[in-house]
Amino acid sequence: MMFKMHTAFAVCIFLCLPAIAAEFLPNAEIERMALFSPDQQNSDLRGHLKPKHKTTLAAEMSAKVQRAYVSEGGRFKKGQVLFVFDCSVQNAELARANALLHAANERLLISRELVSLNSISQLEMANVQAELAQAVAVKDVWQAKVKRCRIYAPYTGRVVALHIRTYEYAQEGQALMDILDDRDLEIEVLVPSSWLTWLKKGHAFSVFISESSTNYNAVITQLGAKVDPVSQTLKITGEIQGKHPELLSGMSGKVSIKAIIDEK
């Protein structure tokens, strides 16, 4: 009998706890206790490194690869030639276009002299000028095609994957290589959406990267634009402070974010 009374009393106390808390604790404090457990939730936070800039370079023309100047994992600098295509036909067409342009310029000079002597009509002069404009357009077209014979690096970085080799034939639009800028890495972390009450851009945190067994200081650079309704999490992006050449894209580790709670 005594045991049943003790059990009933314990159940009553358990059910009354929310009401007691509401009576003696401020609403903000109750909400903080319910939604935020920093030690527990921090222990589950993990982040991974990713590059700010990554690109898949594709062929802008159909041609045979004459030479690839880089290999997988290799480094390159901005503006460096990465691929050269066999453009024998395009170069020949450009040379012919330049010759036709030169001839059109000569005809224009002669026609101007003839016009001054009233030896040709204005209509004939207009035709000569039209031929010159057409020759310029043809030259510009082939010049643009010849520029596509070389693929240049858009930024300094490394080759992630090479999809084609020297002497292989590339189709227009075919992926040639994947590249990334490994000098400027970001870290992505999923955090509880309830942290939006205090987590702001510029908030400092730390990350322990498993692969390097080192702790790094970082700062939040961007908060996600959408909360996942199922997991109630928000993606945040951070930037590791300083230069760390040992870090690579894809590395991951444990993230520690200290809360800033308004005590007012």
Image: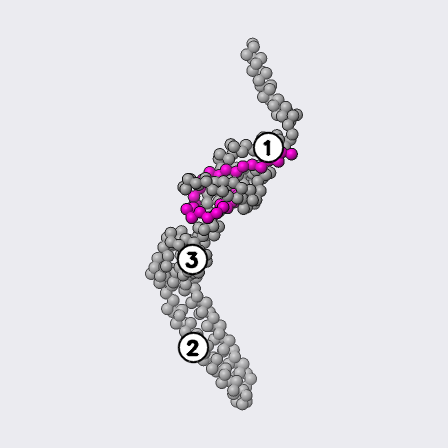
Depth check, mark 1 against mark 3: the one in front is 3
Query: Which residue lies most toward the right here?
Result: 23
The C terminus lies in quadrant? top right
Crowding near pointer 2: few (<14 within 10 Å), some, many (20+)? some
Q: Which residue is mark 2?
A: 99
Residue 106, x across and y down, in percent: 47, 82
Mark 1 vs mark 3, CA separation in Å? 50 Å
Which secondary structure is most common in the magenta stretch?
A: loop
Q: Residue at x 61, y 23 (%)?
A: 17
Q: Which residue is mark 1?
A: 32
Q: Residue at x 45, y 56 (%)?
A: 155
Pick whichever, 29 or 160, lies toward us.
29
Q: Which residue is mark 3?
A: 77
Residue 187, compared with residue 23, is above or below; it is below
Q: Amino acid at mark 1?
A: Arg
Q: Which residues are magenta?
A: 235-264
Mark 2 vs mark 3, CA separation in Å? 36 Å
Quarter-wise, where is residue 38 in the image? top right
